[in-house]
Image: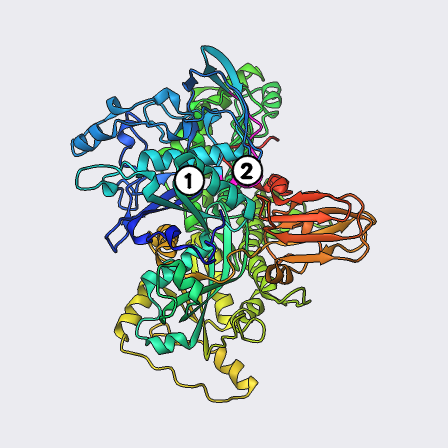
């Protein structure tokens, strides 16, 4: 099912009043999951407490907590395989009749009830564990909550479902299960994993929740519900279609999808209310442009969207049960461009994990070298230990069991890295980060590494270390985690730490301390990786979005991201929409969501880009609300005087005082704050569906198609604007050596696209001299089809797992997936 519901004329019998449905939005985040519900007859949306039933699923549930150390309304997105899973049925593979993917779990698995919901609701107010109210514990393949009394083993941790559904990475593993009284091994398809996780969350944590029950305490039927799922921009149209259809088939409810960065716009309009005070006439004369930058944990997503308010067409009115002959001003939405990549906050966490692992290795080696009581032979054997036996980003070569103890250390290590990620900064002096200080998590990791180092020294290297030496190892490891700046002293004591790595190459120069060179290299590499991360998740994606904003295949180049940002603030092509509407004024809103406003290097870079491009001050959500409330009198937009281009640019790029409310047509930049950094996406998705705006290009393909040639010539870049306008593009030139059709997640990619992040191979072509590409041609289940004169047909669904950036995605799945060395 397509994300933006089709706006074709419907027979009146098919019209459903959305306000009379239970509308559930679910943001399956890489870090945590959020849900809102719109209840029939109520105008306010309710936030669902997704951890409500978890006391039945673990003796001591490891609940997600908010900044006040209270149980959060979110569900932690860290699941594991249930080692006790068993099924009475024999394991058999079933091929989906429409989409072709294989399933092995029982047909009813996605609707397995895990709790005695009625009894739980009656006893919910009483304290203590409710584990006796768990049901069918061994009939569910997944465990949704860690039990601190018996933590997940690391071998059971599952990679993030959204990323493996996108790429198919991380699914090589087979799992042992008990089926029909016998042991068997199964391997799950990505669609089966995400479908079952989504359905089980909806079935067990949302539908039975008290907020959805009526006055007789009854749960709603799925036929009276609609589910809106948020998805990353990196998903192809087929990803979105198959996800929606698989959940719909399992539950029997209507399912829609909307991209996360699109959903943020609707949260911003509904809750931040940047247009407060504008009259209806003023709104109808404006085009509001929204540029969202949503840097989540798993993906970075950007959208450029235009919203106007005008009289809807007769067909649009009829599809909403309105009188086609009466005037109805509706919100019209045109999604101009999207881009995205699987490189969110999780990648920065992994960068820090690799940094601290290197710092631990350095400290451990220096400590082992300092043991003066060893004989020269013992010191030589001990010198073979170059690093910690416990690997934190890759699989350990030492015989360390992947049990709950290792899993607990990995998750503790991840939390430590996330803390440093929130606090570090990048300045002209290099990476700046405060010391974490003494923390139990650091001590436990240090104890663990000290013990296995002691064991390895004895068992492999025949060196018996004392308890005092074990204590020194423990102190060194803990210091690397708790006080990295102390370890840094050795590098910073040099005149130029960054130059140490290349020092000593010239004749006559003094030889630098090799340990200081190594330490300087560790810090220098971190600085380089942070700079590259900021460039990838801000500058590069902004240029990509601007390229997608360019009409057709026009060859437009941008010097930098600031220029790209300025370009996106004006008209697209001619300033008219397809129906001839030309706005009197355009106002651009830039909205920052996710971790973009939390990670200081990203925030600092964004602030500079905003100033350089003309946005000026970036407001916090709360500040803009305060300023808007203070000046909420009806605003009148006066006609703009005619001015020279130079004067327009000068006025456009002025900086504004952050204490002044922006005018009704000033560009404005806002960062979402507090819980809305994550909750805004789910709220916006629900408001998008409930408000039912007119989607002007619901079937548009925002990716890029490229045809490469076996002879090595320049790839043929499909004009996506032509394809989206006409629903078909025919390439009639001779392409006898056409080889591969690539689908890329953004139109912003041009030549060399197949090497860009997320490039997917649609299929290999046979010799042909005619290529036709159609959007949703008749009698096909695929959103996009390529056909040739030789009779070959390639559907987009065949490209779903042809991603070329598998290595980077594997890093994004850490720590549930450890890399092979």
Q: Tag 1: Cα neighbours inside 10 Å, few (<14), some, or many (≥20)?
A: many
Q: Is residue 362 left or right of residue 70?
A: right
Residue 358's tag is 2
- 718 is higher (above) or lower (below) than 358: below
Quarter assignment of residue 547:
bottom right
Q: Position of residue 673 (x, y in %)?
A: 35, 57
Q: Is 165 situated above or below 571?
A: above
Mark 2, Cα crowd under 10 Å, few <14 / some 14-19 / many 20+, is: many
Q: Which residue is mark 1?
A: 416
**What distance separates the C-alpha of mark 2 from that of mark 1?**
15 Å
Label 2 SS: helix
Q: Find the magenta span and give its range.
A: 162-175
Looking at the rendered structure, the secondary structure element under dot 1 is helix
Residue 425 coordinates in the image, percent (x, y):
46, 54
Left or right: residue 103 compared with residue 790: left
Of the 4 image quadrants, the one containing the C terminus is top right
Disc on res. 85: none
In the image, 611 versus 337, the foreground residue is 337
């Amino acid at each position: 099912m397509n994300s933006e519901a089709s706006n074709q004329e419907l027979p009146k019998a098919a019209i459903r009043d959305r306000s009379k449905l239970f509308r559930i939005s679910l943001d399956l985040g890489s870090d945590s999951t959020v849900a809102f519900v719109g209840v029939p007859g109520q105008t306010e949306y309710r936030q669902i407490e997704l951890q409500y039933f978890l006391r039945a699923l673990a003796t001591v549930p490891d609940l997600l907590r908010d900044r006040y150390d209270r149980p959060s309304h979110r569900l932690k997105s860290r699941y594991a395989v249930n080692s006790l899973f068993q099924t009475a049925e024999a394991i058999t593979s079933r091929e989906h009749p429409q989409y072709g993917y294989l399933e092995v779990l029982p047909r009813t698995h996605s609707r397995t009830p895990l709790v005695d919901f009625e009894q739980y609701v009656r006893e919910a107010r009483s304290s203590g564990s409710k584990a006796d109210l768990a049901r069918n514990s061994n009939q569910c393949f997944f465990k949704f909550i860690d039990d601190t009394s018996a933590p997940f083993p690391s071998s059971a941790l599952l990679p993030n479902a959204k990323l493996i559904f996108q790429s198919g990475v991380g699914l090589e593993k087979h799992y042992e299960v008990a089926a029909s009284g016998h042991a068997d091994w199964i391997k799950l398809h990505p669609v089966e994993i995400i479908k079952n996780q989504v359905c089980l969350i909806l079935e067990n944590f949302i539908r039975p929740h008290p907020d959805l029950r009526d006055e007789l305490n009854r749960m709603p039927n799925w036929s009276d519900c609609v589910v809106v799922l948020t998805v990353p921009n990196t998903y192809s149209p087929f990803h979105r279609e198959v996800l929606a259809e698989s959940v719909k088939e399992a539950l029997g409810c209507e399912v829609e999808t909307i991209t996360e960065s699109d959903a943020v716009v609707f949260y911003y309009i509904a809750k931040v209310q940047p247009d407060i005070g504008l009259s209806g006439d003023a709104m109808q004369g404006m085009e509001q442009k929204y540029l969202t930058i949503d840097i989540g944990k798993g993906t970075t997503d950007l959208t450029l969207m235009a919203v106007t308010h005008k009289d809807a067409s007769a067909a649009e009115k009829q599809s909403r049960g309105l009188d086609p002959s009466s005037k109805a001003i509706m919100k019209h939405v045109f999604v101009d461009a999207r881009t995205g990549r699987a490189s969110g906050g999780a990648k920065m966490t992994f960068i820090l994990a690799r940094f601290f692992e290197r710092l631990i290795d350095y400290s451990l080696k220096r400590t082992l070298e300092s043991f003066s009581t060893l004989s020269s032979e013992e010191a030589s054997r001990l010198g073979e230990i170059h690093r910690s036996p416990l690997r934190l980003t890759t699989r350990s070569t030492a015989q360390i069991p992947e049990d709950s103890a290792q899993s607990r250390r990995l998750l503790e290590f991840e939390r430590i890295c996330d803390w440093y990620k929130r606090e570090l900064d990048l300045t002209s002096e290099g990476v700046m980060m405060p010391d974490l200080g003494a923390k139990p998590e650091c001590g436990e990791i240090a104890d663990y590494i000290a013990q296995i180092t002691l064991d390895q020294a004895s068992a492999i290297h025949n060196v018996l270390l004392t308890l005092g030496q074990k204590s020194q190892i423990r102190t060194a490891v803990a210091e690397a985690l708790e006080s990295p700046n102390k370890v840094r002293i050795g590098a910073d004591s040099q005149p130029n730490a960054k130059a140490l790595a290349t020092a000593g190459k010239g004749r006559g120069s003094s030889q630098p301390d090799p340990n200081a060179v190594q330490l300087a290299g560790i810090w220098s590499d971190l600085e380089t990786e942070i700079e590259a991360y900021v460039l990838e998740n801000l500058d590069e994606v902004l240029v990509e979005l601007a390229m997608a904003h360019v009409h057709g295949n026009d060859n437009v180049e941008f010097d930098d991201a600031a220029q790209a940002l300025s370009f996106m603030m004006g008209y697209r092509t001619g300033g008219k929409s397809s129906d001839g509407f030309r706005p009197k004024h355009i106002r651009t809103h830039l909205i920052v969501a996710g971790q973009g406003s939390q990670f200081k290097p990203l925030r600092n870079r964004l602030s500079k880009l905003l100033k350089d491009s003309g946005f000026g001050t970036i407001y916090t959500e709360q500040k803009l609300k305060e300023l808007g409330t203070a000046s909420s009198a009806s605003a009148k937009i006066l006609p703009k005087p005619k001015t020279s281009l130079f004067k327009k640019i000068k006025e456009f790029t002025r900086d504004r005082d952050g204490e002044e409310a922006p005018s009704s047509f000033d560009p404005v930049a806002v960062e979402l704050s507090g819980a809305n950094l994550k909750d805004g996406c789910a709220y916006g998705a629900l408001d998008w569906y409930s408000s039912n705006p007119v989607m002007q290009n619901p079937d548009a393909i925002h990716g890029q198609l490229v045809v490469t040639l076996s002879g090595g010539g320049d790839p043929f870049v499909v004009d996506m604007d032509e394809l989206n306008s006409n629903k078909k593009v025919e390439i009639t030139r001779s392409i006898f050596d056409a080889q591969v059709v690539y689908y890329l997640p953004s139109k912003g990619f041009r030549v060399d696209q197949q090497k860009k992040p997320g490039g997917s191979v649609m299929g290999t072509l046979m010799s042909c001299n005619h290529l036709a590409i159609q959007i949703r041609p008749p009698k096909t289940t695929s959103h996009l089809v390529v056909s040739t004169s030789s009779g070959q047909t390639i559907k987009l669904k065949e490209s779903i797992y042809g991603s070329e950036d598998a290595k980077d995605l594997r890093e994004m799945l850490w720590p549930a997936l450890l890399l092979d060395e």
